[in-house]
Amino acid sequence: MAPALAAANQWAHLGERLHPYDCELLMTYRSGRHFLQLPGPTNTPFRLLQAMARPVIDHRGPEFARMTKGILAELQWLFRTQNPVFVYPSSATGAWEAALANTLAPGDRVLSFDHGFFAQKWCHVAGRLGLDVRRLPGDWRTPPSPSTVEDLLREDTERRIRAVLFVHSETSTAVKTDIAAMRKALDRADHPALLLVDAVSSLACMEFLHDEWGVDVTVCGSQKGMMLPAGLGFTAVSSRALEASKTASIPSAYWQWDEMLRFNERGFFPYTPATGLLYGLEEALAMLKEEGLGRVIARHDRHAEATRRAVEAWGLEIVPCDAAHACSSVTAVLTPDGHDADRFRAVVLDRFDMSLGKGLGELEGRVFRIGHLGDFNDLMLAGTLAGVEMGLSAAGVPHRTGGAQAAFEYLAREDPTNPGGHP
C-alpha cells in the first residue's frame, strides 16, 4: 500500500473530511516558519547561510590569511579593544577554559558569585581545572553588589584572590551585572585580581567596552548576538592578561594564547580552522557594521522594553527585581505559583510552532525565557509576543489580556530609526 494511503487509513476516523494525501502532509509538514525564540542559538539570517555555503579554501594560503587578518581587526572593533581577540572552534565553554588556563595556575583562588546558572557553570569549569573557587551565595534575581566585591577584596590582605569571575548578562535569569562598577570596586580596593567576564549574551546586543571598563578577559560565543550557529568561542584579552599567561601553568595545549599569537600574526591558526563558520563570522561583522553598533544596541534595548511592557500588562513578573538590572537580549518571565513553565512552553511549541527558553537550575519549571536578540525586528517580536499571549490562554496560565497590544503600541510610538542617543 502506498505510504499516503496507509497514512489515510490511520486517520480513517476523520471520515471524508481529509483527502488521503492530506494525511501524509499533516504528519510531516507545518506551514510557515518556526519561531526560534531561545536566548541562543538565535536565528541565522539567510545572508550568513549563503556566506557559509562557500567552498572551503586552503587554510594555509594567502586568501585565507587576508580573511583572518580582516576578521581579527573587526573583532577588536566589536569588543571595543586594541588588544588581541582569539577565536577557537569551540563553544563558549571552551572560551571559559581558555580564559582560565591562560591566566592562572592550579590552586589559585578565584572569586565568583552564585547569581545564575551560567555563573555556576563557569565555577564548575574552574573547579575541574584545579582552581580554588570561592563562590559567594547570591540571589538569582539581583546582580552582585560592587560594594560587596570591594569589601571582600579589601579583606584579602594576602592578595590570594587571583581573579574575579562575572557574567555580564546572565542568560538564565536575564539579570545584568554592571561590569564598569565592578572594575571601579577592584580599583578602590587596590587589588591586583584579574577581571574575567562572560559576555556571551551581551556582546553585539548590549553596550560592552572591554578596554574602557578595564576587563582582562572577555569570553563570548558565536550563537547569540553574532547571529551564527554555535561553534566559535572568543577570548578578548588585556595586556595584564597576556602578561599573566607567561606564568600560567594549568595544563593545556589547544587553548594556548602564545601559539595563537604566533599564528594569528600571519593570518593563520595553530589547528585546522572552522572555515565555514569564519566565512559566516566575516559576514556577520560586516552586517553589524552596516547597521552601526549603536543602532544594534538601541534596537535590542527597544525590543527588551517592549517585551517587559507586555509582561507587565499580562500581570506577570520578570525575574530581575529591578528593571534597571534587566538584560536587553532576553526576558525571563516567572509563571504564577502552581503553573509549570515547561508545560506552558510545550503548549506553545505544539500549538504555535514556537520555541521559548526553559528555566535552568533552580528556576526549572518556574520560568520561561523570551529571546529577542540577534537578527530580529519589530514584526518578529510582534509575532513572538502574540504567540506567548495565545499560549498563556491555551495553557490556562492566569493572566490579563492586552500584553501584546501594549508592546505593539510602544513599538509603533518609538521610532526605530532613532538610535536613542547611542554613539
Image (cartoon, rainbow, N blue to C red):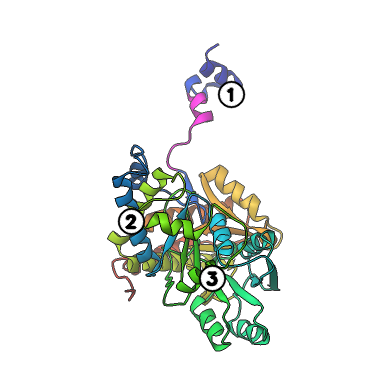
Tell me where residue 363 appears, x and y as whole percent: 67, 61
Q: Which of labels 2 and 3 is toward the front?
A: 3
Kind of residue indicated by mark 1: Trp
Dot label at residue 69:
2
Q: What residue sits right under mark 3 in the picture?
A: 244
Tell which of 401 and 118 is nearer to you: 118
Q: Residues within 10 Å of mark 3 (few under 14, many from 20)?
A: some
Q: What residue sits right under mark 1 in the picture?
A: 11
Q: Quadrant of the N terminus?
A: top right
Structural distance between the alpha carbons of marks 1 and 2: 59 Å
Q: Quadrant of the C terminus?
A: bottom left
Q: Which residues are magenta?
A: 22-33
Q: Secondary structure at mark 3?
A: helix
Tell which of 13 and 268 is nearer to you: 268
Tell me where residue 393 appears, x and y as whole percent: 58, 53
Structural distance between the alpha carbons of marks 1 and 3: 67 Å
Residue at point 60%, 51% (across, down): 345
Kind of residue indicated by mark 2: Lys
When asked about the image quadrant of residue 365, the answer is: bottom right
